[in-house]
Amino acid sequence: MNSWLLRGLGMASVHVVTRVVLGLAVTQWPLHGSSLRWLSLALVVLAALLWGGLDGIRDARTAVDEESGADLTMMWLKAAAVAGLLAGAVTWLIGVITDIALGDNTLFFELTSGAAFTVLLVFLPAMLAVAVGRFLVRRKAPATPAHVSPGAAGAAGAAGAVAVGEYANEQDYDVVETAEENYEASEWAYEHGTGQGEDQTPTQQQYANDAPTEVFEAIRPENGK
């Protein structure tokens, strides 16, 4: 059974039962007719409020964001139309075949003006309760931007991890590159001695000064040796 049809039948039943109980109560206590009518009206509105509030709470808990929620407006509009037409027809039929004081309204009145009034009694309170139910649930939700879905949040986290990994790889590359330069500088110093040529790089000059290039003392003719 469709959700809107179920709600329409349920609210029609509430309306018919309330009308029948009201007719019996007015017959029993005719001086309290006005108070009893207001009480019956409040019961119908309360039923719509409770049912609509439950729908709003359930929808807010299951929906990912506001745009992905169910279309409760059309559902309750259809339900209110079914409740108004069905309640009007059943109430008229009960008034015809029984002696309960349900009014002297015709079937045409029950299916037009009476049904329209019932539609308002069902639809407006239900939509108000839906809005309140959604608001209460979303107010208690974690402070996460509504437009960011869990998938997007996970993608952002993965992107951050990749960025960190790339940064770490760049640092490793710099360390390796520096080691290679130091190695090349030491090789150059070993081959060309400790002298610092103009074509030497600062790194090569540094390693050339520190690296020993003479194993034995050089023979110098000017000293007589």
Image (cartoon, helix red, strand yellow):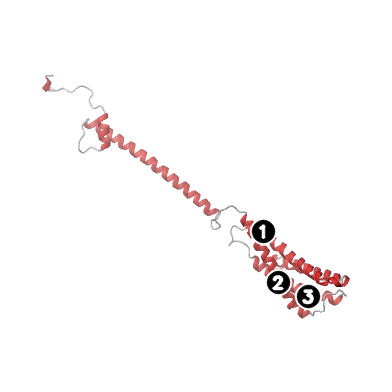
SS of the residue at dot 1?
helix
Residue type marked 2: Leu
Residue 83 on image: x %, y %: 74, 70
Label 3 Cα neighbours within 10 Å, binned few <14 / some 14-19 / many ≥20: many
Q: Is any part of residue 13 visible from this angle?
A: no
Residue pictured at 73% horizontal, 74% vertical: 117
Residue 215 on image: x %, y %: 23, 23
Q: Earlier in the sequence, mark 1 or mark 2?
A: 1
**Real-space Cα separation, disc 1 to disc 3, in angstroms:** 32 Å
Q: Is residue 74 above or below residue 178?
A: below
Residue type marked 3: Ala
Residue pictured at 68% horizontal, 61% vertical: 55
Q: Are marks 1 and 2 in contact (CB under 8 Å)?
A: no
Q: Is any part of residue 125 visible from this angle?
A: yes
Residue 72 on image: x %, y %: 65, 65
Q: Are marks 2 and 3 in contact (CB under 8 Å)?
A: no
Residue 109 on image: x %, y %: 76, 79
Residue 8 falls left or right of residue 70: right
Count of marks, rendered view: 3
Image quarter of residue 98: bottom right
- Marking on residue 89: 3
Residue bearing the label numbered 1: 57
Residue 186 falls left or right of residue 22: left
SS of the residue at dot 2?
helix
Q: Is residue 137 above or below residue 208?
A: below
Q: Earlier in the sequence, mark 1 or mark 3?
A: 1
**Real-space Cα separation, disc 2 to disc 3, in angstroms:** 17 Å
Image quarter of residue 95: bottom right
Q: Residue furthest top?
A: 225
